[in-house]
């Protein structure tokens, strides 16, 4: 039986360190798709928090800012991939900062698929397999590292 991100939900809920580290890893993969410098700064705050350089208060401020910025993103008028990738990447950052790791991973996967052309996100569920596989392997690696530290 193969694992899925859902198999880790209880562990993610119980461990803020794992939750934020995994969410950060996922959104770092879509950094290049972010169009707004303030969203990039929010992502930098998340990375700083995971590294222990930023406190929880700064994390909460960045989470609030990222949510507002994602909700205001203009997106794209067509399913061309470009605007949708940036919107999904912005929502990935907002969810990551809010500690919603699985949702951040989902938005990051959408951003990657949209960024590769867009149409796979709505017509080909298999287009998500490479990213979801990377996410699962990353989560398993992070969970293993955390287990050795405990």
Image (cartoon, rainbow, N blue to C red):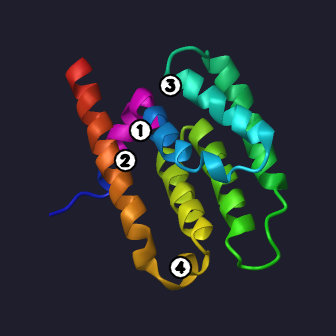
Q: CA distance from mark 2 to mark 1?
A: 6 Å
- Distance CA(mark 1)–CA(mark 3): 16 Å
Disc tally is: 4
Left/right of residue 69 with respect to residue 119 in the rendered view: right
Position of residue 51 measured from the top left corner of the image (x, y, whole percent): 49, 20
Few, some or many residues within 10 Å of mark 1 (<14, 14–19, 20+) = some
* 150, 110: nearer the viewer: 110
Q: Residues within 10 Å of mark 3 (few under 14, many from 20)?
A: many
Determine the main secondary structure of the stretch shown in magenta: helix
Which residue position holds label 2?
9
Residue closest to the eye, 79 or 11: 79
Q: In the rendering, at what x and y percent does residue 52 appear?
A: 51, 15
Q: Determine the image quadrant of residue 93.
A: top right
Q: Which residue is mark 4?
A: 120
- Residue where numbered disc 3 is placed: 50
Closer to us: mark 2 or mark 3?
3
CA distance separating discs 2 and 3:
19 Å
Q: Magenta region: which residues?
A: 10-19
> Could you tell me which secondary element the residue under label 2 belongs to?
helix
- Pointer 2 with pointer 1, Cβ within 8 A: yes
């Amino acid at each position: 039986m193969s694992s899925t991100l859902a198999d880790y939900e209880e562990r993610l809920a119980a461990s803020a360190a794992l939750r934020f580290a995994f969410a950060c890893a996922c959104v770092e993969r879509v950094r290049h798709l972010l169009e707004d410098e303030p969203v990039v700064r929010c992502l930098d705050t998340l990375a700083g928090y995971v590294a222990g350089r930023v406190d929880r208060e700064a994390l909460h401020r960045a989470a609030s800012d990222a949510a507002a910025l994602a909700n205001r993103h203009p997106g794209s008028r067509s399913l061309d991939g470009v605007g949708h990738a940036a919107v999904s990447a912005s929502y990935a950052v907002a969810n990551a900062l809010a500690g919603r790791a699985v949702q951040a991973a989902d938005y990051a996967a959408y951003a990657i698929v949209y960024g590769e052309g867009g149409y796979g996100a709505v017509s080909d569920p298999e287009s998500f397999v490479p990213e979801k596989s990377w996410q699962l392997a990353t989560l398993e690696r992070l969970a293993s590292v955390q287990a050795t530290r405990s």
